[in-house]
Amino acid sequence: MSSNGNASGEVFYPPEHIIRQANQPDYDAIHQAMLDDLAGTWGAIARDEFEWFKPWDKTLDDSEAPFYKWFVGGKVNIVHNALDRHTQTWRRNKVALLWEGEKYEQRSYTYHQLEREVCRFASVLRAMGVNKGDRVTIYMGRIPEIVIAMLACAKIGAVHSVVYGGFSVEALHGRIEDSQSKVAITADGAWLRGNIVPLKEIMDEALQRAPTVQTVIVVKRTGQDIHMEPGRDLWYHDLMNLPIAETCIPTEAVDAEDPLFLLYTSGTTGKPKAILHTHGGYMVGVATTLKWVFDLKEEDTWWCAADPGWITGHSYIVYGPLLLGATSVMYEGAPNHPFPDRWWDVVERHGVTVLYTAPTAIRGLMRFGDAWPNRHDLSSLRLLGSVGEPINPEAWKWYYRVIGKEQCPIMDTWWQTETGGFMITPLPSTPLKPGSATRPFPGVVVDVLDEDGSPVGPNEEGYLVIKTPWPAMLRTVYGDPDRYVEQYWSRFPGMYMTGDSARRDEDGYIWVIGRVDDVIKVSGYRLGTAEIESALVSHPSVAEAAVIGVPDEVRGSVIQAYCILVAGMEPTQRLVEILRDHVAHEVGPIAKPASIEFVDALPKTRSGKIMRRVLKARALGQDEGDLSTLEQ
Ligand code: PRX
């Protein structure tokens, strides 16, 4: 293997026993089988590994591409496969969800117990008037009820729209309004580093701006006094104790192509868009990717340390592990609370065998030194994973050496909200180069293109595109099919535009560089410039605003904002703090700018578009590039 890929050219080969036990030992053979017959190979997996109420007529329908359809005519429900079928086997009494609260409380649900809770809450939702196809907004912290709520929606064919608990008023309002949810589910609060995030208060404020919601169901988590709006707000525990909460209701047979969930994400311009995923294809995609990449076995205890409010949590805390009948760990709090070894303590106490997290968390914990992980027995670990942004080789090696003791290959998985599951990723048998997500998942064909759509040479940077459909792909942008076509399929016709730039080395390994659009990754969280800018200009003192991401050692990037103040406003340090808090209040603490600069003008094109590229170059002291379109 050549060595140009990373600076030091190091390649890490997986231990023999890891290769020997792999669920999918032969990458080349299965990749080739998929390339030869994509629909046939996925069809065989879908038939053999899942239960369908009615078989499909056509595995892949590309007649209306890019509106691809999978398993057309099939009847299924992801919840039947994630819960119901396991309760018919010995797995009934196996732990499905193992939860640890920030204050060390523990709760576990066997498949049987989880199925009962989901039935009860599904029948509560029905009694609240939620029908098939209705959208339900879920806004909660990392507690078991979020999983129960998601599965309960899916069970009755309703469409969940989870909003990350770190988002705030305007972000929540926009997502509720766009989805037209009539029912929302939240909690009185969430614990974070010993503090309470006032989820219900934020929900109340968002609902003043979005009156579509008729019912709010509130889980009691933190126990502080909250306002309950008469006629609208109901306690989860009250509803679950009523006779309407039946413990055994049938799972709705839905079409494979029926919507399962919406998940809002930021894109090139404008408001966040709702990515739509479906029951059939998503089910087959997430389970298969998890099974092959992280090699889940019956005896594994899997911990995806993401938040359920993002795609990583949807696919790999909730659906993927349950579809495989695994034990999924969920931890409520911060990695370093109360001490920097909290995560390693969780790994040790629960005997976690596979840990999946983000580079930002690894870098954050690495800062505390080796002594914290070293005081724990981490020998239960077999594989490690990374997601969300490129992992720098230094963090990769620390993770590999200090956490994995050089025995656990690291699966650096590249994918997106839109892709539903892993797209570029090693399998356990893949030789690894720190910083590269290695090769496409079997059946996925990627390319790296120049401006004109021609493939670039080895190690040259270009646009990362995907050339084959895959089962867990997004189906559309909810309510805006034109935007789906325009944003993903128009730049290079017939190909899916990822929005990322990448290089491919001479071994065919992909090195993802980062976004080429207006998306900023802060601690691995995906934020759009437009959402933050509109929060800034919603403050009466700001006339215009532009934000960029600038590199940060731990968080990957942080937000830097430029504001033009309305005439007469004083550019004070106090105003900087007010505006930072205002963004946190409107969008969420993760969107809070690290710095705000007051300026008299912003670089714009003649058509009035802000040239963020120029701002970024200036901030980093780099060449400003081609300025021919800049308005002088
Ligand atoms: O830029 C890529 C980056 O995260 C983006 C997708 O963000 P989101 O939809 O929030 O999903 C994150 C979790 C799947 C991508 O366009 N990204 C994700 N994983 C990696 C990555 N960049 C480099 N390496 C990765 N492993």
Image: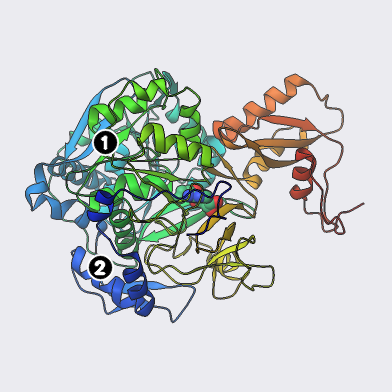
Task: Judge left or right: residue 39 versus residue 206.
Answer: left
Which amino acid type is marked by label 1?
Val
Tag 1 secondary structure: loop
Badge 1 local density, few (<14 within 10 Å), some, or many (20+)? many
Badge 2 local density, few (<14 within 10 Å), some, or many (20+)? many
| Total count of labels | 2
Task: Judge left or right: residue 364 versus residue 503.
Answer: left
Q: Which of the labelled discs sits on residue 194, or is there none?
A: none
Color scheme of the displayed model: rainbow
Identify the residue position indicated by label 2 in the image.
46
**Residue 503 location, x and y as percent?**
59, 59
> Would residue 417 be visible to someone looking at this image?
yes
**Residue 340 location, x and y as percent?**
42, 21
Height in image: 135 above or below 44? above
Identify the residue position indicated by label 1 in the image.
352
Residue reaching furthest right? Answer: 632
